[in-house]
Image (cartoon, helix red, strand yellow):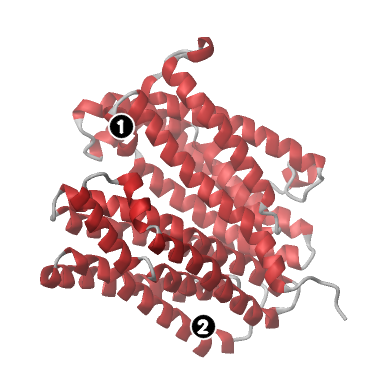
Amino acid sequence: MSDSPPLWRTFLVFLAPMMLTNILQSLVGTINGIYLGQMIGVDALAAVSAFFPMMFFFISFVIGLGAGASVLIGQAWGAREPEKVRAVAGTTLTVALFGSAMIAVFGGLFCRQILIALATPPAILDAAESYARIMLVSMPLTFVFILLTSMLRGTGDTLTPLVALAISAGLGLVATPALIKGWLGLPRLGTASAAWASVISGVFTLLWLTLDLRRRRHVLAFDGAFLRAMWIDRTFLRKVLNIGIPSAAGIVTMSVAELVLLGLVNGYGAGATAAYGAVNQVLGFAQFPAVSIAITVSIFGAQAIGRGQSNRIGSIVRTGLVMNLVLTGSLVAVAYLLSRLIMGFFITDPAVLELAQRLLRIVLWSSVVFGMALVFSGAMRSSGTVWAPLSIQMFAIAGIEVPSAILLGRTIGIDGIWTAYPITFSAMFFLQMSYYLMVWRKRAIKRLI
């Protein structure tokens, strides 16, 4: 009789720190926005927001790289082959450092021209430039932090990324107001304060990670063995990119669709736009468990494949579906019960509050369905199957979500735009599940490395 703990318990131990990490990351962004808006003014917040499209593109790329690397590392870790873990990690970090160095140089030289090309309003151009240049020049720090935490998850470690983010967040939340106000004899840096705080927290956090991993003799510690793996293995790179590029493309596709839907919502006035922002804040928090569960399914699946136990993927998927139903479903239920209180944190106008509540009721339940779809795509990603799930996702967004929002918006108003979300998520769930059951599950699953 096996002494190993039940899968749901192992799943939950891995999942809980990752959920907390995602929530903490979102809270830090919100608090930094409050700092800038309240302590400097709305122009500072606008200046930082002007850089967001550029930052999002780069972050999407590195998240994709991290997704590809974590699958390969998961398989190598499951097979107990630490040299391959280092080879994949070394290749990925080398490519990321090379790419981020190019961004740093190019961004540092042409930051102002890039912001002008993005139609940054002249009134905030100087402030946006001071913020964006620092963020671009420090891009290697950002890339390494994101990749290292993602690769740690591939080895089954979600606690270290949580601690690292807590350190980074704590330093950043202290440094930002200190640099804004010039506390402790520090210079007053205005809008650039948030960027410099990010650099300070990034340096100290990476230093802590380096020392902690070396102390534990972790396979990803920057020791002699790891440094010897810091070169580009074309075979591993191709496999990382085969998974990473579709993952990044999926993120970008969803964001472009959101911009289209936001444009439709904006046509109903400022109140509708405010309601859109508030509802999306709640949706984002409701979907944290779903996204985290999908990543867990992907990594557990990759490790099972590495161990030669691909027959366990079915039970991993079932556990992911149940976890999604329980965790995401519970969060959704609480949000329905406390919808007025929650919306009241963001909105004070009674008419807009009523609108936001109505829209939230239309869309919130579909977060559970969205999570179910992600579980199936996460399982398929664990074997390196990414293009089919991506094609399904892009079809659901471009072929169902956007046309539905336009058509229903014209026929039943703003409620119709929000109805497009449940329609899309339901279609995505049905299609991903169908492909998983009817095609992917019937294939022979082989290790990628």
Answer with the quarter of the image where residue 111 lies.
Answer: top left
In depth, the one of 168 and 151 nearer the eye is 168
Indicate the amino acid at tag 2.
Tyr
Q: Quadrant of the N terminus?
A: bottom right
Q: Earlier in the sequence, mark 1 or mark 2?
A: 1
Left or right position of 398 against 330: left
Between 171 and 260, which is closer to the camera in this rendering?
171
Residue 411 in the figure: left or right of residue 286: left
Q: Residue at x 68, y 47 (%)?
A: 160
Residue 436, disc: 2
Point 44% across, 52% down: residue: 60
Specify whether residue 249 is in view. Answer: no
Q: Which mark is residue 373?
A: none
Q: Between residue 152 and residue 448, name the one nearer to us.
A: 152
> How many neighbours does mark 1 have within 10 angstroms: few (below 14), some (14-19), or many (20 or more)?
many
Label 1, label 2: how many angstroms apart (C-alpha)?
44 Å
Where's residue 237, x and y in %? 59, 58
Which residue is painted at 53% across and 70% down in the image? 324
Provide residue 401's location: percent of width, then percent of height.
Answer: 28, 70
Quadrant for the C terminus, please.
Answer: bottom right
Q: Amino acid at mark 1?
A: Ala
Left or right of 310 in this view: 276: left
Measured as percent of width and height from the top left, residue 89 is found at 66, 52
For disc 1, the marked residue is 47
Please tell me in which quadrant of the rendered image residue 129 appears: top left
- Would residue 375 be seen by someone viewing this image from the given angle? yes
